[in-house]
Image (tube, helix red, strand yellow):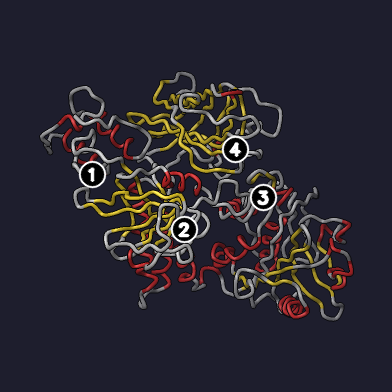
Amino acid sequence: MRILKKSVSLLLVIAMLCSCFMFLGINASALSPLPHLLQADEPWGSYLVGGATIARTGCGILSLVNCVGYLTGKRMDVVECAEWAYSVKGFNNYSNSLGTYRLVLYPKVQAKYGAEYGFTVDCNTGDSGWWVSDASSKVLKNHLANGGVAIGMIPGHFIAMVDYDATTNKFHVLDSAPAAYRGTSSNRGDVWLSESHFTESAGYSYQLQWFCLLSATGTPADEQDNEKEYLEQAIANAETARYDNYSESALNSLRSAYNSALTVLNSSSSTSENYKSAREALESAINFTPSISVGKTYTATATNRGDDYDDDGKKLTDGKKGSNAPDTSAYAGWKNQTEIVIDLGKAKASNYYNVYLAGGDWGIEIPKDGEFNVAVSSSNDGTNFTSVASSSTLVKSKLNGLWEILKVTAVSQNSVNARYIKFTITCTAKNNFIWLDEVEVCSGDLLLGGGAYINKMNKKVTSGDCVVFTPDFGTISTTTANHTYTKNILVKWSNEKDAYVVQTISDGVANLPAELTLASDELLISAHDWETGVSENHVEGSAVNAGYIASAKVGDIVYLNGVDADNNKLSVASYLKLEASQSDTNLGDIDGNGAINSMDYVMLRRMFFGIYEIANEAVGDIDGNGAINSMDYVMLRRVFFGIYSISVDSF
């Protein structure tokens, strides 16, 4: 009794974390326009996403795929959908939990897939969806009877609801993990169930608790004019970007694309094609990656442990880094030493190499500098390797419970053109555990780092924020600013330094007045840690961020990037860096502004080519060999990006 699906309102329902198993082959259903899919079907059933297989936790994903297939006759790619859901923290990636988190995932589905597959999503005028009541049940029945579909949640599981027959008071259900106790074991889970089956009286395991609605647009995706909405979503995504995921040039490109997108969005003369072009340019900038090794094959020489943390030849180049929970099978573990050889498929240029690791729990020690060494070598035949870089400097990026997530970056002095890249990784920390998330071959400028992200200006601090308060905020108090539990620095503009200088450091409000009014040349910067000891809804990177602000010293210079304090505006991916107050002749400070910045290495390069002169050339002699050469330029760039330290003594 299926009516042609025209009006569309997505039943996006996912809400609980679900673990559902069933192993059956794919057969065409007699009732549905497309064969409905099971989460245990291959090739996706055994596919690992964020520490669990789709067969185990994929009911929320498959319910979405089955709803869209029934509604539009178009088949979504299960693995691609699961990977995207993971990337937005809606699947196997929310607060260290497995399964689908409906309130995160489903409100984002229309912007991602609506135009491509021809549907809209209705989450009840917001993001919360419908909780089942007498009134909402009428909405659901009417929606299904008139050609819509819905994703429904019962305890521990999601189902696709694709039709309703008023004469029999039955719902057409597609269950991606058929089970006898749910009444869905027949016909591969393609069944009709009475309304009484879903009521409280039928038992808690069957009770329908929540749903959201999907509707077909009735218009092919390429004829839809939803581009303005999609551009708005891309702009919102850009506003959550973090600076340390970008190189300096990539960040400039992101900001340029973002500003252009805002101009297009706010122009009354913009067309659908204008929206689309701006969105595509912005999405390209957002998705920047320097990695050339994602998805590439590799081999590891060390013997596997014989447990869930064995290497599978895939997990270390899957592109997921730093967000996987270290206590899941997304990590590979060895002891003492391992060699990992990545095959890039053909000779490619590369110049820096990242290793992502974790420690802090299960007896896996957090290595100290010098206890975890990464040596990188290259080859074009896979047999004869030449050393290109090494490093034992660890950079902390975030916390995950007791775990610390760290990164080691080894930088080559010259560009390397090779097919095979070998990582020789040695750990001498207590217990000698090597606990790896990703190894990465990169090409291009180094990623930014060694600072603190800024995500708000003149707004009350909430979980994990780093907020800049300007004089225009007015009176700063614990009520208006909520800075009681933040790390705070009060900074003042210095004409001599052409930058802000730290005046006061305060853990919470200990060293600040109860009510603070900023002078015209002052700012208050407040960073909140919502990661240390936080098990739910933690903000990744906020612990390191707050720690960086807390490390400031009175007199330190504060360089703001992407922050227009005079006009109270933030660019996307804004950040700050601290510099110890130094004399004007400090090593590497070519432009004499008291800090190492991008202008210094631009000017140093000009010195090397003989097109710029300064009185004291020793300032540019970074490697100390008595002459200005290409190595000085390379080393100064590393200093600016926070992956190399030089002496700060004056000449």
User: Which label number is shown at residue 315?
Assistant: 4
- Residues at badges 1 and 3 in contact (C-beta under 8 Å)? no
**Mark 1 or 2, nearer chain start:** 2
Spatial CA span between label 4 and label 2: 40 Å
N-term-proximal mark, 4 vs 3 = 3
Q: CA distance from mark 1 to mark 3?
A: 45 Å
* Up-down relation of residue 163 to residue 365 (above or below): below
Residue 112 in the image: above or below residue 502: below
Mark 4 or 2: in front is: 2
Q: Which amino acid type is marked by label 2? A: His
Q: Quadrant of the C terminus?
A: top left
The 10 Å Cα crowd at callout 4, few under 14, some 14 to 19, many 20 or more, is: many
Residue 334, compared with residue 274, is above or below; it is: above
Tell which tag, 1 or 4, sits nearer the viewer: 1
Q: Name the one closer to the observer, 621 or 438.
A: 621
Give the side of residue 568 with respect to residue 39, left or right: left
- Residue 139 placed where, x, y %? 72, 79
Q: Position of residue 400 (x, y in %)?
A: 58, 43
Q: Which residue is mark 3?
A: 97
* Residue denoted by label 2: 483
Nearest to N terminus: mark 4 or mark 2? 4
Q: What is the number of the mark on residue 515? A: none
- Other residues around mark 3 within 10 Å, as few (<14) / some (14–19) / many (≥20): some
Q: Residues within 10 Å of mark 1 (few under 14, many from 20)?
A: few
Tell me the residue that label 1 is attached to: 599
| x and y percentages locating residue 215 in the rendered image | 64, 73
Along the line of sight, which residue is nearer the eye, 84 or 639? 639
Identity, as a three-letter code, of the amino acid under mark 1: Met
At label 4, the amino acid type is: Lys
Q: Earlier in the sequence, mark 1 or mark 3?
A: 3
> Could you tell me how far apart the alpha carbons at marks 4 and 3 are, in whole angstroms?
19 Å
